[in-house]
């Protein structure tokens, strides 16, 4: 009677192992990806020791080790390596990075006087300082006892001067320029319409603005020449003299003198700069604040746009529409919309939103601008509004489907109870169904946000730029400028990786930016998930 | 534990309570789900302030008839009816009558208790909010009155803002009853209200029906003949969509006229 | 948990007790009618019989209704069954009292009897025993019920003595008057009242203990 399969273990146990294996593979891929990005991204900010290397052919290198790879053409069983050093001083060396055959390096030392500089222009520099000329005129040699302290003090002072200059030139002069543009447009309009009084008033206004401009320029000049600017005289690896005015120095550190705690502090300082500062050097250096800001603002807008549209559409489809062939076609179309490639949405956004809608808005509301300002479009070109709309359109199917599912999952009894009390259909939807399906709707919004925050292709067509002069959200009225172009993290990654002139310099930033993008999306999702959990707790009986 | 007590409210006997004899009047009423005829030529009068029970085996149409009294079957696709149902002399299918206003005069309690995922207070006053009452004092008073009538006040008066979903099954059903009577409808429809409850909870709800019948006209569908015998003044027996017999409860259960009725109540059916 | 329909059970008990009191009143009244020869009392008793009959029908309806509609269990079932029998016995007691009244009127027509044999004593005991039976029901006192079963023998004994005294040991009927024959009927009726009281007591014992003590004596 006992057969070979007469055991008491349940059948299919092997599949438990298979599913576990699948999970491990998936998890492994995610962890692998994250680790790769983290490791490559984080190393951007860490400051290791900087060697002075003597090469075979007599050259001396001072630089931070960047990469190590197998030399092309070296035999497989006895590979030869080459090292990439970041030597900086692009204006002298032609290139910030240098590859050297590992075998050719005769010796390496780590002298304590090596100084690393991050500069406003021309990238980083690794030099051996000789003398410091302070702002009060005194000169200190690098070998003097108080050199390091004096140096850092001067760097800080120079930073203050630099900030002031930026404030004057960028912000105040920038404001004046903006007003002047507007006044010029008004003047041309007045001239065109032959309004003599207006013309007179505008000319006077422009004169006043030009006066302000001149004043500010003088102020700037004063700041520049005002205090004597401190400068550092150093020698580079080839013993050439390098003079660096300290206003050019963003950060300075002695890589071979730092203890671990010092390195950690430097790490966080760089990290902070990365997240909060503005970019420099064609986006290869500096921070990503505008891109972070742009991504955040756009994602938030997209969510704010897609949620009401999606929810209302879903309510109509599920609650009000007549069952029948037409409804089925509509639903199929909505589902198919989710499969359309995102670049197609970009093209649609460009053609319809930008040209048709934007053009019409410009014709209707900004005709003066067009006429008197060289046809510079306001809304007729890419911008924050059109990007948000395009992505909202793209993620609409996700929200619609999620909302429909959530509405369908509300138990029929609840609907009946509400209607039996004499509530109208709309009251039932508003007071019972929507609150009960809120967690499910939020799930849809979370998915939409995740998808939208990561899309780059459509954005390139409708409003994202490499470098935006202003933020879309600033102090001037109307505070939120939906017509402005903005920067986006995803685009930033693409731009750095493929469009930058110095691809070696850009490499570390690509990883760091990717990491930042991942962190941003995770934070957005966590925020939404927290809200959803709170909603779930309130509606204990809901089936989500 | 509540000490045993006689019914607190003095409920008048059936004949004293009875108001208009044809308060709810069903005349030659037929009803179809698509092609299937669910009700066939139903004619009966439900007097005011009486409890009428609809009994019969599964699929006999009793729930269908009940749900048509407040036109809940309008929600189902592809239905039609013939004949008429009038309440207080006015047809419920009258073109000038908004279904919503009908449903505000006719409260309903369902088989599976379905409180909203809101607080107890919000559940009870939902009907009042629906008609536009905003005054907090009015809402609170109505809430207390309804909960007292539903014999739930003492158990929940300290936690009105707690979620309604935290109550026990019997309490939830009493909450649904409170919700149904909050807006003082004239008629209360109950579709197998105790079928998901244990005997103690069932007993409490039957006590409640006994007290409510002094003020409300109640129509109750039940698959328990014993329950129909205990609580109702009149009973209608249905089978396969047809009305077999409708009379006082005593007559139906002690000496029914129809042989089918006799067979059903003595359990010899099928 | 008290249910609303339990009130109807209470109502049933009250109606039964009312019947009992009426039957007892009738028995006492009719005894006085026999002793005093007062026809008006006899007529009153005959009128009261109608009301007891009505009560019996009402009690029976209530029992039927409760059994059908409220699905009683346990002691409630015994109460309903016992109530049915007690009601019948009380109605029979009232009937017997009515019969005694008729006989009393026949006697008084012929003129008052001097020798009432042991009928008055029998009557007193019969009323006492009925009272005892009623109290055992009202108070739920099983001891009183058992006492009723014992004392019924006294009534039987007195009834036999009435017979013996009237007809003598040899059953000689020559010196017996028509009125005395009526008196024997009255004695028999009283004996039957005692039997009905005994039945009531047996039902009370069944109600209180579930024990069926009929036909054991």
Image: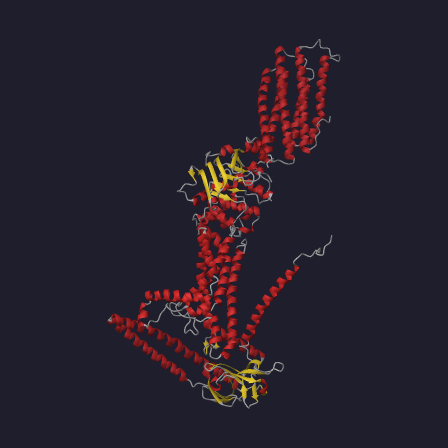
In the figure, A480 relative to C170: above or below? below
Name the quadrant of the N terminus of chain B: top right
Name the quadrant of the C terminus of chain B: top right
Judge by depth and name the residue closer to the eye, A185 or A270: A185
Q: In this view, does B201 lie to the left or right of A296?
A: right
In the figure, B269 relative to A170: above or below? above
Q: Is residue A289 left or right of residue A361?
A: right
Judge by depth and name the residue closer to the eye, A192 or A470: A192
Coloring scheme used: secondary structure
Is there any visible trace of residue B145 in the rendered image? no
Judge by depth and name the residue closer to the eye, C142 or A360: A360
Find the residue positioned furthest to the right: C170
Residue B82: give x, y in percent of width and height.
45, 39
Residue at 47% over, 37% down: B29
Q: In this view, does B83 lie to the left or right of C27?
A: left
Residue A386: give x, y in percent of width and height.
41, 66
Residue A410: give x, y in percent of width and height.
51, 52
Numbered marks: total = 0
In the figure, A442 relative to A127: above or below? above
In which quadrant of the rendered view does residue B151 lie? top right
Is there any visible trace of residue A210 in the rendered image? yes
Residue A543: give x, y in percent of width and height.
54, 54
Q: Is residue A339 left or right of residue C175?
A: left
């Amino acid at each position: 009677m006992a057969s070979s399969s007469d055991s008491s273990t349940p059948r299919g146990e092997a599949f438990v192992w298979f599913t576990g294996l699948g999970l491990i593979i998936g998890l492994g891929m995610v962890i692998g990806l994250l680790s790769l990005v983290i490791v490559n991204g984080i190393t951007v900010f860490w400051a290791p020791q900087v060697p002075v290397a003597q090469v075979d052919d007599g050259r001396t290198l001072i630089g931070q080790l960047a990469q190590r790879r197998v030399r092309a053409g070296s035999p497989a069983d006895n590979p030869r390596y080459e090292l990439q050093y970041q030597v900086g001083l692009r204006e002298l060396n032609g290139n910030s990075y240098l590859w050297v055959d590992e075998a050719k390096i005769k010796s390496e030392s780590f002298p304590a006087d090596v100084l690393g500089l991050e500069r406003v222009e021309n990238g980083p520099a690794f030099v051996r300082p000789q003398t410091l000329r302070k702002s009060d005129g005194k000169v200190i040699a690098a070998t003097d006892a108080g050199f390091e302290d004096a140096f850092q003090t001067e760097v800080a002072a120079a930073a203050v001067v630099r900030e002031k200059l930026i404030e004057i030139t960028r912000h105040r002069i920038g404001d004046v320029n903006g007003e002047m543009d507007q006044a010029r447009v008004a003047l041309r309009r007045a001239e065109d319409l032959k309004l003599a009084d207006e013309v007179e008033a505008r000319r006077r206004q422009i004169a006043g603005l030009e006066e302000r401009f001149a004043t500010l320029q003088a102020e700037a000049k004063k700041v520049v020449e005002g205090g004597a600017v401190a400068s550092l005289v150093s020698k580079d690896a080839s013993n050439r003299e390098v003079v660096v005015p300290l206003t050019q120095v963003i950060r300075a550190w002695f890589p071979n003198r730092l203890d671990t705690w010092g390195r950690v502090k430097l790490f966080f300082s760089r990290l902070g700069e990365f997240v909060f500062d503005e970019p420099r050097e064609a986006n290869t250096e500096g921070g990503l604040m505008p891109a972070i800001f742009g991504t955040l603002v756009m994602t938030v807008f997209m969510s704010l746009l897609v949620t009401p549209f999606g929810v209302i559409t879903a309510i109509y489809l599920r609650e009000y529409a007549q069952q029948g062939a037409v409804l089925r076609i509509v639903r199929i179309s909505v589902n198919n919309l989710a499969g359309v490639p995102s670049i197609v949405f970009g093209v649609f956004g460009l053609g319809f939103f930008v040209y048709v809608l934007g053009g019409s808005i410009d014709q209707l509301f900004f005709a003066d601008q067009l006429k008197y300002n060289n046809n510079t479009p306001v809304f007729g070109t890419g911008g924050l509004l059109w990007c948000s709309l395009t992505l909202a359109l793209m993620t609409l199917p996700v929200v619609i489907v999620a909302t429909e599912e959530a509405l369908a999952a509300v138990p029929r009894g609840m609907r009946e109870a509400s209607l039996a009390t004499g509530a109208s259909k709309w009251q039932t939807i508003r007071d019972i169904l929507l609150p009960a399906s809120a967690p499910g709707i939020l799930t849809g919004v979370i998915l939409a946000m995740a998808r939208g925050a990561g899309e780059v292709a459509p954005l390139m067509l409708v409003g994202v730029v490499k470098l935006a002069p202003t933020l879309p959200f600033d102090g001037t009225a109307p505070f939120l400028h939906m017509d402005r172009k903005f920067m986006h993290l995803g685009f930033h990654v693409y731009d750095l990786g493929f469009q930058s002139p110095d691809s070696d310099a850009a490499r570390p930033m690509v990883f760091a930016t990717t990491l930042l993008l991942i962190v941003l999306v995770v934070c957005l999702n966590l925020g939404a998930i927290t809200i959803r959990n709170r909603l779930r707790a309130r509606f204990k009986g809901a089936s989500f | 534990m509540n000490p045993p007590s006689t019914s607190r409210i003095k409920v008048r006997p059936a004949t004293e309570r009875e108001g208009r004899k044809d308060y709810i009047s069903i005349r030659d009423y037929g009803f179809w789900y698509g092609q299937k005829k669910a009700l066939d030529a139903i004619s009966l009068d439900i007097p005011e302030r009486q409890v009428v029970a609809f009994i019969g085996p599964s699929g006999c149409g009793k729930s269908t008839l009940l749900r048509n009294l407040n036109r809940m079957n309008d929600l189902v696709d592809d239905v039609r009816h013939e004949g008429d149902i009038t309440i207080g002399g006015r047809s419920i299918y009258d073109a000038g009558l908004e279904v919503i206003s009908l449903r505000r005069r006719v409260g309903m309690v369902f088989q599976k208790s379905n409180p909203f995922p809101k607080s107890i207070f919000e559940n009870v006053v939902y009907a009042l909010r629906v008609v536009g009452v905003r005054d907090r004092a009015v809402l609170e008073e109505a809430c207390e009155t309804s909960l007292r009538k539903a014999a739930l006040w003492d158990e929940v008066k300290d936690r009105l803002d707690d979620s309604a979903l935290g109550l026990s099954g019997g309490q939830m059903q009493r909450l649904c009853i409170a919700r149904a009577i909050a807006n003082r409808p004239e008629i209360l429809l109950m579709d197998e209200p105790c079928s998901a409850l244990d005997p103690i909870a069932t007993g409490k709800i039957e006590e409640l029906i006994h007290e409510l019948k002094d003020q409300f006209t109640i129509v109750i569908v039940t698959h328990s003949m014993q329950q129909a015998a205990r609580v109702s003044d009149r009973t209608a027996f249905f089978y396969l969509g047809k009305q077999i017999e409708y009379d006082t409860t005593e007559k139906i259960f002690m000496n029914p006229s129809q042989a089918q009725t006799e067979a059903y109540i003595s359990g010899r059916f099928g | 948990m008290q249910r609303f329909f339990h009130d109807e059970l209470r109502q049933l008990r009250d109606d039964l007790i009312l019947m009992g009191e009426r039957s007892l009143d009738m028995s006492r009244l009719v005894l006085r009618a026999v002793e005093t020869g007062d026809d008006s009392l006899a007529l009153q008793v005959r009128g009261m019989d109608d009301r007891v009959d009505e009560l019996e029908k009402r009690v029976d309806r209530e029992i039927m209704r409760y059994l059908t509609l409220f699905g009683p269990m346990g002691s409630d079932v015994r109460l309903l069954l016992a109530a049915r029998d007690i009601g019948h016995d009380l109605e029979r007691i009232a009937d017997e009292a009515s019969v005694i009244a008729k006989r009393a009127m026949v006697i008084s027509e012929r003129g008052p009897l001097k020798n009432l044999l042991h009928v008055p004593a029998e009557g007193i005991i019969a009323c006492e025993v009925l009272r005892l039976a009623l109290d055992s029901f009202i108070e739920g006192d099983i001891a009183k019920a058992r006492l009723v079963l014992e004392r019924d023998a006294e009534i039987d004994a007195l009834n036999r003595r009435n017979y013996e005294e009237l007809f003598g040991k040899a059953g000689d009927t020559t010196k017996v008057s028509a009125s005395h024959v009526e008196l024997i009927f009255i004695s028999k009726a009283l004996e039957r009242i005692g039997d009905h009281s005994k039945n009531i007591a047996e039902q009370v014992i069944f109600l209180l203990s579930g024990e069926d003590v009929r036909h054991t004596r």
